[in-house]
Amino acid sequence: MKAQPRASHYVNGRFVEDERGAPLEVVYPATGETIARLNAATPNIVELAVEAARAAQGEWARMRPAERGRILRRAADMLRTRNDELARLETLDTGKPIQETAVADPASAAEALEFFGGAVAAFHGDFVDFGGGPFGYTRREPLGVCVGIGAWNYPIQGAGWKSAPALAMGNAMVFKPSENTPLSALALAEIYTEAGLPDGLFNVVQGFGDVGAALTAHPHVAKVSLTGSVPTGRKVLAQAGAQMKHATMELGGKSPLIVFDDADVENAVGGAMLANFYSTGQVCSNGTRVFVQEGIYDRFLDRLTQRTARIRIGDPLDPATQMGPLINKAQHDKVTAYIDIGRREGATLHHGGGVPQLQGFEGGFFVEPTIFTGVEDDMRIAREEIFGPVMSVLSFRGEDEAVARANDTEFGLSAGVFSRDLSRAHRVVAEIKAGSCWINHYNLAPAELPFGGYKQSGIGRENSLAALAHYSQLKSVYVETGDVVSPY
């Protein structure tokens, strides 16, 4: 099974290679086999990409926003037309089931391109009347060359979420995918070119942390947008901040999902499963601390166990498969280690926790969907981001207790509330210290809504008009229509 691209990088509208770069092997997580061999970017590739972006950005920024948007919308149509082939590529790259990638990955990128392509024409400055003649206005201007650093759980979505607002606003972008999932960003780059995006405006360079650091530190880069872990975010933000660069950090979480005793149990169980087992639990916003009110705790747990037991693990390319492997061996080792930690800390391994042996996929990085009960708030499995299909189910008595325990974390990315009492649901959401919240659902991220976190979970927002603001700078202009009054 191969997925070898024509070259490792995409710079100035064409594939480029530099075999002096460090080897970068792409492994299919379901089997452990190498499906592509690339090279990380050398300093020369980094320089070529930044210079291509810099050379192209000025003319692009001078185009009418509606013209820029037209190209993005054309690219969105192409993403939808090629959804099946892109979904298969994303499954090979990530190991996620094809039933997920076919509906969630290229489609989410297309939604972002379509939204920003349409929204940017109406995103502009304001007119201010000072009375009697003088007036002022503001201008929304692009930043210049922006760097996007993607995560491995949603590669093409991340490339779309970062490039769409950047390009719509008149910026150029150099995008570095995760070294674990380098393939689909190259496919997006080709689509952009076919859609009419001028050369140099979206460049893809591969590599490890040193390449990301080189891009962040480059003197001609105005902004960096990272999706990744909190430790990585701290490093990148410190590097960007040292040069006063704009930065958006979409980082990790240990998010709460609160289920009140008046909730629809089936919906709440479905939400909890989406919040823990979708993408094999490798979602930054996952609600891995599920707080269930005592009155329905047993009923919730029974249905959760029954439905979890039916999850089908297997070949990610089989449309019937519901859960695939983790991304690589290191992540598999990390997740299984946390399952052992949960046992040692005294939590009850209620369901799963094993490593399934699947015929034909013996080299894959599979783990069973796992449910812990008897979890205390100070246990590591309740405080640290695991990034795997490991759910902690905790009970609570009253609303104030649930809110206090939900907020007792350094993270603040997401939260969910299930309740038929919408007044209470809105009241609780208002008290939760998290940037992206759901009421009676979980993990939906439409392009129209901002996505991002509080506290250690990040700075800035992806999606919505807020993202256009983060890829622009605001200029104020005062215009005098009369004489200058001066004491001199």
Image: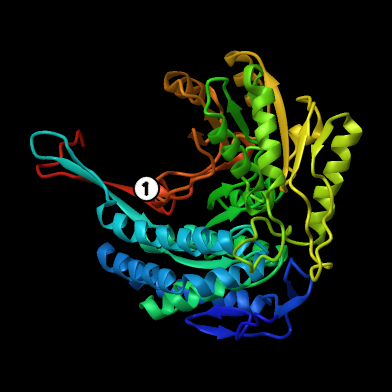
Examine the image and state in which quarter residue 287 appears: top right
Position of residue 247 relative to residue 47, above or below, is above
Q: Position of residue 372 (x, y in %)?
A: 78, 34
Seen from the viewer's position, the closer of residues 410 and 335 is: 335
Quarter holding residue 362: bottom right
Q: Is residue 54 visible?
A: yes
Q: Residue furthest right?
A: 344
Q: Which residue is mark 1?
A: 465
Q: Is residue 389 left or right of residue 247?
A: right
Identified at 40% across, 64% down, the residue is 167
Image: 108 above or below 378: below
Q: Tell me if 147 is positioned left or right of 236 in this view.
A: left
Q: Secondary structure at mark 1?
A: helix
In percent of width and height, residue 331 lies at: 78, 55
Residue 149 visible in the snapshot: no
Residue type of the residue flagged with mark 1: Leu
Please indicate whether residue 9 sits to the left or right of residue 358 in the image. left
Q: Residues within 10 Å of mark 1 (few under 14, many from 20)?
A: many
Residue at the (61%, 40%) spot, across then down: 457
The image shows residue 397 at horizontal and vertical percentages of 65, 14
Q: Give the total number of marks visible in the rendering.
A: 1
Give the position of the N terminus as an image quadrant. bottom right
Nearest the viewer among 114 and 95 is 95
Quadrant in the picture for the C terminus:
top left
User: Which residue corresponds to the image point at 46% horizontal and 61% vertical from the top-left?
Assistant: 107
Expressed as whole percent of the image width and height from the top left, the position of residue 118 reads 29, 58
